Each structure stands twice: as structure tokens, then as C-alpha cells.
């Protein structure tokens, strides 16, 4: 029922050939051979059904008309006329139309049901992946949170001591640069710990209504200089529609996705990152979805799930927390972060909406 374009074309060609063959059989068979003509009339149903299988209601209806047009001259006007009673021939023509339309309608119903089932299965797969990912992140988040807090407490003492030591030296002193290195490294370590804490437990979202376009324009303003310096074009295709979310956290998610897209597109001839927006229904629930796509080489299938795991990165200077933090934020929103592979890589951040 769900053939490729080539199969449908072959079915249609076969149907036309069968119509021509049956019609020729009518004309070359003597009118006294009533049984043969009865069989030929019944065989006309075969091309009608084939056309309905190939092109649904339209195919079945059109082929029924073609068959009727091919049969009528032989049935009523030719000297090789079908010897069957006129009522039988008229009824047969009506049945051609009924069978063509009915079969085509049933085929289309089944195709629609198949399409709905396919969408439902895809949504189920997305939600299952999200649940598995959430379980992993929850366990790792608890461990990370504990470690980060244990590190941060002595780190504060170390920072205080380092600042006290630094204040003992004048800038001209030969040991002063060493104390500055110490402070800089402590600051960097503090940023790493802060990243761990953000991953482990971002604040609950404070949702409010905001224009999707306004949210993206803010992000565009923040990133313009950075992306222009890397010669990466950022395009936005976001309508002025209202969404309800935590704009700061949503902005952080989109920021991470755009920066990831920029890294992926860097090697392209004309590196481009595009932000799009659409409203979707997933598992029957409405979502406002922001998509970030790039024209890079794409994500290998082997890494499609791994990239969401904490600390996974393909960059030498990456922390591996960008997508993990984004995923945790989406979970706090009750949303979904998903990867779509195709002509372009698209990361979708879908925020739930009130039905």
C-alpha cells in the first residue's frame, strides 16, 4: 500500500497495458462467445484496483473513467458489440466507478493511518530517548552537585588566601606575576565548578510571555560580533509570535545551540547558522519549537546520542557541558531537546505550551 514512486508508476503502466489488452480482446473475440466477453468485462476491475493502489482515490476514479470510455464503444456502438443485456452493461459501468472510488478511498484511509502511526512512533522514540537521557543526567547531576559543593568550599578559602598573598607584593615585585597566575587559575577553576553546578541543577524556570522574535533578536545582538569575527552568517526566520518560557534560560539553550552550530559550520564554504521557529504537536501536546540548523558536515550517526552526555566534546578547548546543561534546562521546562538529521543538522528545542 505504501509504494515508492517507481512502484506506483509501474503499477499505473501495468494498469494501462491491461486495459488495452482487455479492450483488444473484446474486439477480436466473436460476439457469439458470450462467456469470453463476460470474463473480459470482469477483468476490467483489475486495472482499476491497481490504479487505486498506486494513486488512491484519484487513481481509482480516473482509471474507472478510462475503463468505461474504453468499454462503452464496444458495449453499445460497435458491430462487434458485447452481446450481454444492456442493463448488465450499464450496471457494470456503474460498478467500475463505485469500485474505483471505494478502493481508492480505502487506500487513502490506510495511507493516512500509516502516516499518523509513523508520526506517533517517531514521537514515542523521541520521548523514550528523552527519558533515558534524563535518567542518566539525573544520576550524574546528583554526583556532580556533591563534588562541586565539596570543591567550592575549600576553593573559597584558597581564593581568600591567594588574594591576601597577592596584596603583600607590589606590582613591580618579581613574585607578583606568579600570584596573578594563581588568582587567574583559581578563577578558571571556579568557572568550571559553576558550570558543574549549572548542569547539576539549574534554577526552576520563571515563565512569562515573550515574543519569539524578540528572544532571538536579543541573542543575535549578543552573538553578532563573535560570529562576524569568525565569518559565520547568522540568519533568523522567526515570526513575531508569543511564547511562554523563561527567556533567560531559553536564551542560554539557544546560545549553546548556535555556538555548536557555528563550530560545525566553520569548515563549510559559506558557514551559515539559521534559527527557525514552528509550532508542533508531540504525543498530542502543543510545543513551541526553536530550530538551529547549520550547513556543516553533520553529526555522525554513532555520536547522535553521545553528544548529549555530560563532558562529551569533540573540541580540544570544550567543556562538554553545553548540550548537557541545555538538556537539563529543557527538562526543567518539561520540554524536549532533539537532533534531526537530514540535508542539514537541526537541533530542536521544544517548549511546552498550554493547550
Image (spheres, helix red, strand yellow):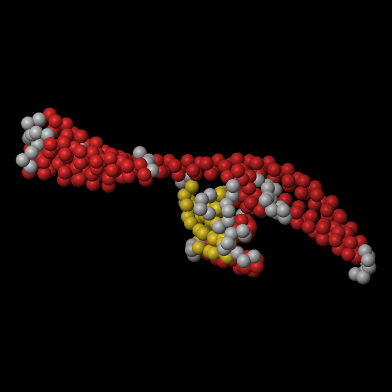
Residue at image x 53%, y 44%?
126
Q: Quadrant of residue 160?
A: bottom right
Q: Which quadrant, please, contains the N terminus?
A: top left
Query: Residue reaching furthest top?
Result: 35
* Residue 249 visible within the image: no
Query: Is residue 44 toward the left or the right of residue 81 in the image?
Result: right
- Pinpoint residue 31: horizontal percent, then vertical percent: 8, 34
- Pinpoint residue 95: horizontal percent, then vertical percent: 18, 38
Residue at image x 75%, y 56%?
191
Q: Quadrant of residue 119?
A: top left
* Residue 132 visible within the image: yes
Residue at image x 12%, y 36%?
28
Query: Residue reaching furthest front?
Result: 28
- Asked whether 308 or 8 is in front, the reply is 8
- Asked whether 208 or 10 is in front, the reply is 10
- Pinpoint residue 330: horizontal percent, then vertical percent: 59, 51
- Asked whether 80 or 122 is in front, the reply is 80
Residue at image x 47%, y 49%?
281
Task: Work out whether 126 lies above or below 256.
Answer: above
Amino acid at each position: 500500500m505504501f509504494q515508492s514512486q517507481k512502484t506506483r508508476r509501474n503499477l499505473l503502466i501495468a494498469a494501462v497495458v491491461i486495459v488495452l489488452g482487455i479492450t483488444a480482446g473484446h474486439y477480436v473475440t466473436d460476439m457469439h462467445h458470450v462467456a469470453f466477453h463476460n470474463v473480459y468485462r470482469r477483468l476490467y476491475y483489475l486495472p482499476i484496483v491497481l490504479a487505486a493502489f498506486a494513486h488512491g482515490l484519484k487513481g481509482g476514479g480516473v482509471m474507472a473513467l478510462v475503463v468505461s470510455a474504453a468499454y462503452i464503444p464496444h458495449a453499445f456502438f460497435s458491430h462487434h458489440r458485447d452481446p450481454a443485456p444492456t442493463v448488465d452493461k450499464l450496471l457494470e459501468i456503474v460498478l467500475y466507478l463505485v469500485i474505483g472510488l471505494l478502493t481508492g478511498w480505502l487506500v487513502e484511509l490506510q495511507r493516512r493511518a500509516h502516516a499518523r502511526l509513523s508520526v506517533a512512533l517517531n514521537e514515542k522514540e523521541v520521548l523514550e530517548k528523552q527519558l533515558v537521557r534524563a535518567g542518566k543526567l539525573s544520576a550524574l547531576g546528583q554526583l556532580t552537585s556533591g563534588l562541586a559543593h565539596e570543591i567550592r568550599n575549600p576553593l573559597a578559602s584558597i581564593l581568600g588566601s591567594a588574594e591576601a598573598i597577592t596584596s603583600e607584593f607590589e606590582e613591580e615585585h618579581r613574585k607578583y606575576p606568579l600570584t596573578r597566575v594563581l588568582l587567574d587559575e583559581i578563577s578558571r577553576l571556579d568557572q568550571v565548578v559553576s558550570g558543574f553546578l549549572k548542569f547539576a541543577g539549574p534554577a526552576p524556570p520563571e515563565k512569562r510571555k515573550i515574543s519569539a522574535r524578540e528572544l532571538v533578536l536579543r541573542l543575535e545582538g549578543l552573538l553578532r560580533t563573535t560570529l562576524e569575527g569568525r565569518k559565520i552568517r547568522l540568519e533568523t526566520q522567526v515570526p513575531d509570535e508569543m511564547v511562554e518560557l523563561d527567556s533567560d534560560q531559553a536564551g542560554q539553550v539557544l546560545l549553546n545551540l548556535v555556538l555548536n552550530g557555528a563550530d560545525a559550520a566553520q569548515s563549510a564554504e559559506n558557514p551559515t547558522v539559521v534559527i527557525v521557529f514552528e509550532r508542533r504537536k508531540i504525543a498530542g501536546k502543543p510545543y513551541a519549537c526553536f530550530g538551529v540548523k547549520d550547513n556543516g558536515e553533520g553529526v555522525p550517526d554513532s555520536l547522535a546520542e553521545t553528544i548529549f552526555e555530560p563532558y562529551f566534546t569533540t573540541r580540544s578547548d570544550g567543556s562538554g557541558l553545553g548540550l548537557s546543561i541545555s538538556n537539563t534546562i529543557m527538562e526543567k521546562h518539561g520540554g524536549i531537546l532533539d537532533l534531526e538529521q537530514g540535508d542539514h543538522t537541526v537541533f530542536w528545542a521544544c517548549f511546552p505550551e498550554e493547550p
